Amino acid sequence: MAAQASIAVGSQVWVEDPDEAWIDGEVLKVNGDTITVKCSNEKTVTAKASHVHAKDPEESPCGVDDMTKLAYLHEPGVLQNLKSRYDMNEIYTYTGSILIAVNPFRRLPHLYDIQMMEQYKGADFGELSPHPFAVADVAYRLMLNEGISQSILVSGESGAGKTESTKMIMRYLAYMGGKAASEGRTVEKQVLQSNPVLEAFGNAKTVRNNNSSRFGKFVEIQFDQKGRISGAAVRTYLLERSRVCQISESERNYHCFYMICAGSPEEQEKYKLGDPSTFHYLNQSNCYKIDGLDESKEYLETRKAMDIIGISSEEQEAIFRIVAAILHLGNVEFAEGDDVDSSKPKNEKSMFHLRTAAELFMCDEKALEDSLCKRIIVTRDENIVKTLDAEAAKGSRDALAKTVYSRLFDWLVTKINNSIGQDPTSKCLIGVLDIYGFESFKTNSFEQFCINLTNEKLQQHFNQHVFKMEQEEYTKEEIDWSYIEFVDNQDILDLIDKKPGGIIALLDEACMLPRSTHETFAQKLYQTFKNHKRFVKPKLSRSDFTICHYAGDVTYQTELFLDKNKDYVIAEHQALLGASGCSFVSGLFPLLSDDSSKSSKFSSIGSRFKQQLQSLLETLSSTEPHYIRCVKPNSLLKPAIFENQNVLQQLRCGGLWKQLG
Ligand code: ATP
Ligand code: MG
């Protein structure tokens, strides 16, 4: 398999094109290092030889189902192959054992039905068309026959289809490892029903995806000796908390808020709900509906899924009561109080929402107001009450909403794990990872920083795996893996998470020093990493920094880094809800032992996330990995549109092909 072939006058080639990425044509002239090509769009282009690639002479219009069958494995060849297959609704393609999935943005029900699962059951890998079922089947067989735990890592950018692929894999494994046709609440049913519940509370419409997962997820399915599912565990990572209070144009809050607004008339009355547009937490973005989604139906399905998981009806009632309470809380506005720098609910309407929120949280109304508008400062001699101004009270309100919501989400995850149950005797598991892909936006904050750290770690894991595979395959079958790009990213990982001295360690340090600001933090970074080749201080900026990630450069704005890294619950909020008359609510705020409740004790989100990642990678390292790379063919989220440049960018981020030229 030659990467480059000799290019002569008359040969068919690919040449770089600013719009199409690559365009085909015929060589008119070869002049040393420059080549003139008559392109298929009638343009004549002269380009450097390194920007011209030979075209597959026997290229079939339907493409090939495994990229390694291509005569030339270069970018234009790979792109053309994916495109011609996509045009024929062939959305899956292998590259060796890696599955590439291009989002069809249309339902293809036959592709995933039971007959299809039956076909893939036990079939040799590569015998049938590429499919996530084939990947799941290989993993299942390997686990069963060799007794080795497996993992399936699904990656790709937002909207590429990770969650959909993950669900198909889980369905296949549940089918293979389930108790056929048995009734009632079986483990595999519970495992599958955890998806709609987590999606209701952890997914939202964003500009990139109508059903975007705002958390990372690793589902570990445990099997017994006979290959039957015997338990499961869900680990989640970094739920986006800010969305509860703040949403951007055309986006929505978490689905559950709209569901409860579409509940039965009795519930609407009980929770004093109405149209989503009447709630501040929902009406900031001018977007309430999602095409093709019926909230009241979704609500009933979520409740049904909760039943199957084993969430009792009392618990469900409390959960949705809390969701409603958060909406009312968001409608409490503040005005200047009677004293200087104090605040109080703005008007009757705000009082009404405050009262309703207190009723639904089952806590004292006055205590709720105080926890929003006042702070108690504990000194050695006495407790001093400090009033908050209207702006600070609003911040306190939002902090409470976010804290309650994230505790609720954690409760759901714990409940799912407890209900499904773990099988301590299981020796084999299959883990499925559905986690956010590399992100680079106009502004990038702490979240992007953590997400991109995840991707660096996974990339390193991928590199190590491919390296191992390469060595094994070379000796065994002489398969050429050299097309896979190898970027050693250890230096980036050191930059971020080395202890001491990495960016996370410096951030923690800044969070603990009383006088730090994001500017002093940035200065410290500039000083420390002056000579680091992966770190750049952007010109004209006093607090941004750029990391040269394996997938490209990303500039981070440090403004909110310190705030977002601090994990604490305001003591007044803890006291308020810990005393709730509803045991579900107070249970979300258990009394901590004296030692850990000291508010001065700083707990770092960045460091905790780093540890979670470490533990995830340890789990992954003890398994045999399989990879699914999801690709989003266009940004319009529409079927049948394949944007070359866009796709290429994603393939490059995946580090799957050597960049030629
Ligand atoms: P995020 O990172 O935002 O969570 P994601 O990669 O998980 O994104 P999905 O939610 O899986 O993306 O997919 C986005 C949408 O694309 C789905 O809601 C669905 O409409 C469509 N889609 C994805 N994969 C398929 C598929 N195989 N068949 C049909 N539609 C699909
Ligand atoms: Mg998702």
Image (spheres, helix red, strand yellow):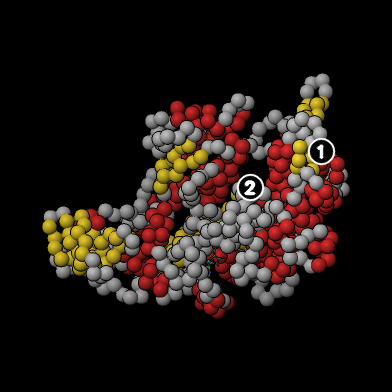
Q: What residue is rendered at 34% in x and 67% in y?
A: 80
Residue 90, image quadrant: bottom left
Does the residue tagged 2 have its C-beta within 8 Å of any atom of ligand 1? no
Residue 154 image offset from top left, x and y in percent: 51, 58
Q: What residue is rendered at 52% in x and 75% in y?
A: 108
Mark 2 burial class by Cα count in 10 Å: few <14, some 14-19, many 20+: some
Q: Which residue is mark 1?
A: 370
| CB atoms of marks 2 and 1 within 8 Å | no
Q: Tell me if I can see residue 480 in this picture.
A: no
Q: Which residue is mark 2?
A: 242
Q: Give left or right: position of 549 versus 400.
A: left
Q: Residue furthest left?
A: 31
Q: Tell me if I can see residue 658 in this picture.
A: yes
Q: Nearer the viewer, residue 80 or 18?
A: 18
Kind of residue at badge 1: Asp
Kind of residue at badge 2: Ser
Q: Earlier in the sequence, mark 2 or mark 1?
A: 2
Kindly state the secondary structure of the residue where label 1 is placed: helix
